Amino acid sequence: MGLAHFAETSPSDILKVKVIGSGLIGTSIGLALKQAGCSLEMIDLDQKAQQLANKLVNGSVLNSVDLIVIAVDIASNKTLIVKALNENSESIVIDVASVKSNLLQEVSELSDNAQNFVASHPMAGREVGGGHSARSDLFKSRAWIGIQSQLTSTKAKQTLEFLVNSCGATLYWHSAQSHDEIVAKISHLPQLISSAFGAVINDSNEADLNLAGQGLRDLLRLAGSDAALWSQLLIANSAPVLENLQAVIAKLQGIEKTIVDSNHEALKQFILAGNNGLRKIPGKHGLVQRDYAFLSIVINDEAGQLAKIFNDCAKANVNIEDLSIEHSPGQLTGLITLAVSDKDDSKLYEHLSSCGWDVFQVKSR
């Protein structure tokens, strides 16, 4: 259940890796393993996707491999795991699918080499898929869940530790049931909420949406996800997804009554509960979230403006913790808001002002 201790597994032990599935996750894993010194072969039913992935990782045909990573959709996952185990008795097989219910039991019933399999799930992704969106640092500083099982060999566990370490992630061990319950709340439910609100927005007047700010875009970011992929995931993990969905529906029904009754105090408590939930989410590098100061800067909508701001921030030796950009409807200006530590707030404000920027201090948002 806790943080894994990495074994002394290195590229000298894991030299050859085959990745089956050349989408965002598979190709990103391939790029990270390439940097770790592994030889790669990328496989995909889509020949164009396979060619692109092999080009990116300098892949080639490998006759025998130390590790096979299965990075495919839920519908194909189990079949390809079993096939890989049965055809490669000496290879370790690792999957990266986001639903684990009954997977280990089913694999053990279909293969005599189930000890070479370890289920896993990297908690990373993007709203855009495909190998062309892959990044070698996609998993950096992200959590990666390994599924505990007495069937899994020590070698398989150590190989997963090497894979996770090579990708720059942190490994946590959970049971399959615990994993599915966790991802239903922190991954699958946010997707549902974003898609639901996107469907509401779809019925809106397009002219009205010209007024949309960054908050709406943040809420709808996940609404751009792959429909075919997510329909599979949500149905495969239906029990915990429905439990969390019902909890949200109950909250919304309660707040509906609160608004109808004009109950200001209850509405305030609802918003404060949301504030407290946000604070529970870890900040950068897994640390407790920090309260930042914010500097808003008016910029012209022209090439090079962002580069100039970042260059001036670097001259002030100030680290930018986060940023957002908003465009004014019908105007040739925009607003960039920088999040900085409290100690750097006044320093950067004075420096950017002296550089000629229109800067405004905002202590909190």
Image (tube, rainbow, N blue to C red):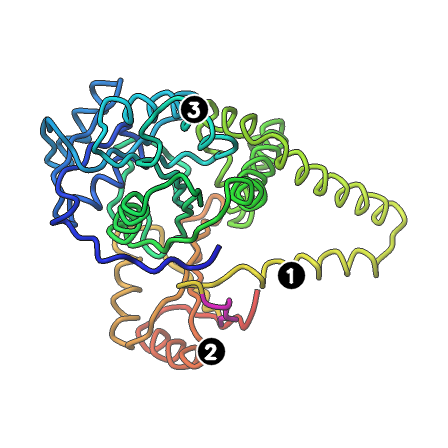
Magenta residues: mostly which secondary structure? loop
* Residue type at tag 2: Asp
The residue pinned by badge 1 equals 275
Does the rendering let one see residue 212?
no
The residue pinned by badge 2 equals 342
Residue at 50 percent of width and 40 percent of height: 176
| Element marked by disc 1 | helix
* Residue type at tag 3: Glu
In the image, residue 282 above or below residue 161: below
Q: First in sequence: mark 2 or mark 3?
A: 3
Q: Are marks 2 and 1 in contact (CB under 8 Å)?
A: no
- Residue 151 or residue 169, whichever sits in front: 151
Q: Position of residue 107 (x, y in %)?
A: 41, 27
Q: Position of residue 251 (x, y in %)?
A: 75, 45
Does the rendering let one see residue 242?
yes
Q: Which residues are magenta?
A: 287-293
- Residue 308 or residue 124, whichever sits in front: 124
Q: Position of residue 197 (x, y in %)?
A: 61, 36
The CA span between labels 2 and 1 is 20 Å
Image quarter where the C terminus lies is bottom right
Mark 2 or 3: the one toward you: 3
Q: First in sequence: mark 2 or mark 1?
A: 1
Residue at 70 percent of width and 59 percent of height: 273
Instruction: Determine if the magenta segment contains residue 289.
Output: yes
* Residue type at tag 1: Asn
Q: Are marks 3 and 1 in contact (CB under 8 Å)?
A: no
The CA span between labels 3 and 1 is 47 Å
Q: First in sequence: mark 3 or mark 1?
A: 3
Q: Quadrant of residue 348?
A: bottom left
Near mark 3 (Cα within 10 A), the count class, few <14, some 14-19 or many ≥20, is: few
In the image, is 24 to the left or to the right of 346? left
Q: Which mark is residue 109?
A: 3
